[in-house]
Amino acid sequence: MAAARRPLLAGNWKMNGLSTSIAELARIIEGFDAALSARVDLLVCPPATLIAAFAERAKGCKVAIGAQDCHFEAAGAFTGDLSAEMLRDAGASAVIAGHSERRAGHGESDLLVRAKAEAALRAGLLAIVCVGETKAEREAGRTLEVVGRQLAGSVPDQATPQGLVLAYEPVWAIGSGLTPTPADVIEVHAMLRAELARRFGEKARATRILYGGSVAPRNAAGLLKAAEVDGALVGGASLKASEFLSIAKVYLET
């Protein structure tokens, strides 16, 4: 990992958490001590119902609060949706765009993901854009083709290293307990880095690329220490302070 890129661990809580979950956030905050915060950025993305409360609890702390999705418009007749501006107003500093569960379950296209990422940038949020192949696509040898196409279609032209984070999440690894080998991850991340450089020039070297998909304390060291891996988008393990912080502590070993 290049010295200029500070690692990021982003916890995606998905559709989990009630008001009582603020106690778990408190444990994350309390455990994210000076030694850890000096080495890695920590972000928690709870359900939208908890963003404001979590942001209030995290005020003045090193733990940032993010969102899991946003609408591409700033306001309007979009019942049930939340704009990037609303999320920022609630206290979020980042938003995930194009998670595979949104792409598959809600039919989100690369074009829509790009519009959401553009909305995040417009609102001053960090856009975490997700890409990743299915099991069938990997078995067909199409991983680099699929992920490269998603990158090209989903990342806005105005993206900067300060406003964009990429997250490579192989769909078949999410929530399955399965993970690609470090060599597989390195191959995809190297391609993503090369494509970013081709599109955005040398400044793309500063863009962080995360790995996501069944990241847990047992496999974190091998994944996070792989070349071109600048952190992780963590699912289930981020719901427990002990596991999330255990993953973060990998960075104390380097």
Image (tube, grey):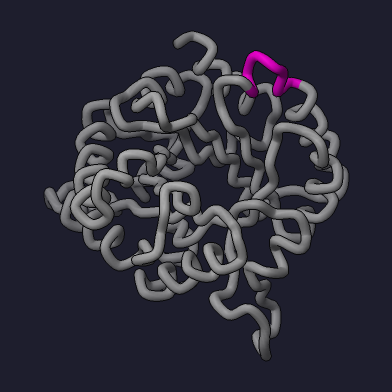
Q: Which residues are magenta?
A: 31-37
Which residue appears at 17% of the width and 47% of the height?
139
Q: Quadrant of the C terminus?
A: top left
Q: How many marks?
A: 0
Q: Is residue 241 left or right of residue 139?
A: right
Which residue appears at 45% of the width and 61% of the height?
98
Q: Is residue 178 left or right of residue 87?
A: left
Which residue appears at 12% of the width and 48% of the height?
141
Seen from this angle, which residue lies furthest left?
Answer: 141
Which residue appears at 75% of the width and 48% of the height?
17
Query: Quadrant location of residue 22?
Result: top right
Seen from this angle, which residue lies furthest bottom?
Answer: 77
Q: Quadrant of the N terminus?
A: top left
Question: In the rendered image, is residue 143 in sight?
Answer: no
Q: Residue 115: x percent and y percent?
A: 45, 73
Q: What secondary structure do most residues of the magenta stretch adopt?
A: helix
Q: Residue 65: x percent and y percent?
A: 69, 46
Is residue 205 positioned above or below 125 on the image?
Answer: above
Q: Residue 28: x percent and y percent?
A: 73, 29
Question: In the rendered image, is residue 2 in sight?
Answer: yes
